[in-house]
Amino acid sequence: MHLLSTVRTIVEPSTHWLLNADGLIIPQLTSPFYLRRSYDLIAFLNQNVYKQKIDVVIGELLAIKSNLTQKMNNLDQYTNELTDKISCIPDYYLGEADILSTIVNPGYVSRIGKLTDKSIVANEDHSSLSISGRTSKQIEVPTCSEFYPMDVSVAAFDHLKGVHNRSKLKMAPEEVLMGLQNAPEAMECARRAVTLAPRESKDIALLSLGTILQRAQQLNDSLIVLHAAVDHEANEPENQLALGNTYMLLSEFNRSFEAYRVTESLSSIYSKQIDYIKKSITCFKVLKINLLTMEKLLKDIIPGLERYGTLQNEFDEYHEKLDREQAPLKSRVFDESYSNQIDFLIQRSQICTTRMAKDRGEPILSCDFISDVQMLMEDFAVEILNNYVDLKQELINTYKINSLGIYKNIFVEHL
């Protein structure tokens, strides 16, 4: 009695039976309880378990699909907006060479020239020598460490990590001096210049040392040395410009802009360069925020996509178990006068035909059948979604790696 009560409770909400136009009670065409062996009670009870499992899976699949669709629409919107923002790339691109550019101020070059003139021997024979007439030995670049032996010196900033580990430093050369990129030897020369330079010219040596550290990506050490250069000569625009560039590379934009402001107040020669940098920052900020937002949306999609794939496998597993005990569609009784079943076939099947059973004269249905969920998963297949994610990731990586320039390592998005 208890078993019968349980069975009654289980099947009570089912829509297995329906009343046809002739007043006959017949099994509903789509019922999962339309079994191959209608007398198999265990199979009947298992069908209810499988049906409930499938209903839960379908509910979660639909919820995930809705959520993923919304996120994908948002991602597509940012992708479309990206087209308008990539104008930054040709118009305001900044590479490292653009920030660490060669000094172009004739006044500053003149300061260096005056120091050089003092070391030239006043001899007509020496001054008349042409570069083309010198031997390779005469024009060989001097080795500073051999010229002036020097111990550890705090005055040369040997306490800084970048200076202390100078033998391991590497740096990119300036475009006008492509053959010179020996960071350790450049550091040796700069240390001696800082130590030996007179007070009134020490900022020149400090700027040289700070720029070497800058090019060697020792930015925090560079900042300390360049501050020392500014302390020695605050009215030299080159010192302020180098300080502003280092602050920018450290993503400290407020301090960078202040240094640029002082630079322009001292000389207008760098105004065009500073204006270009400021416009580049503004433009690439918008571009980078767009790319980072796309990347975040894409990362949010992936867990849902993984769960969606797992649920699809669960659906296939339970759907196979459910189908295993069901009577094949072609053997089910079909009442052509029942409009709901006709609508069902129109909406959920590809090709359906009926034939008359010889023994009973009843119509038998034969269909190339597609269920609601199967249609859902074909429209929203994991393979398609994975391909979508891969294409978006490739697009984001292409711009981040090849198009951001110095902004790959600068947190301009926080400005």
Image (tube, rainbow, N blue to C red):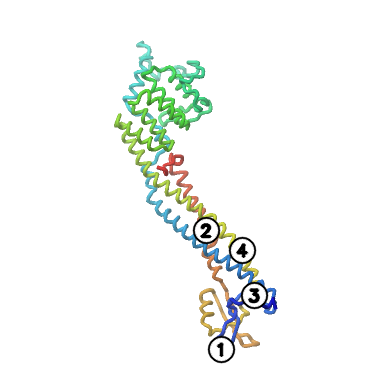
Element on which disc 1 rests: loop
Indicate which disc residue 22 carries: 1
Q: CA distance from mark 1 to mark 4?
A: 40 Å
CB-based contact (under 8 Å), mark 2 and mark 3: no
Element on which disc 2 rests: helix
Q: CA distance from mark 1 to mark 3?
A: 25 Å
Near mark 2 (Cα within 10 A), the count class, few <14, some 14-19 or many ≥20, is some
Indicate which disc residue 385 carries: 2
Q: Compared to 160, does 329 lie above or below?
A: below
Query: Of tags 2 and 3, which is closer to the observer?
Result: 3
The mark that comes first in sequence, 2 or 3, is 3
Query: Of tags 2 and 1, which is closer to the observer?
Result: 1
Near mark 3 (Cα within 10 A), the count class, few <14, some 14-19 or many ≥20, is many
Query: Of tags 4 and 2, which is closer to the observer?
Result: 4
CB-based contact (under 8 Å), mark 2 and mark 1: no
Return the residue at label 4: 314
Indicate which disc residue 326 carries: 3
Q: Position of residue 261 (x, y in %)?
A: 32, 34
Depth order, front residue of 388/90: 388
Q: Amino acid at mark 3?
A: Gln
Q: Is residue 45 left or right of residue 272?
A: right
Q: Residue at x 58, y 62 (%)?
A: 311
Asked whether residue 405 appears in the rendered view, the answer is no
Q: Position of residue 271 (x, y in %)?
A: 31, 34
Q: Amino acid at mark 4?
A: Glu
The mark that comes first in sequence, 2 or 1, is 1
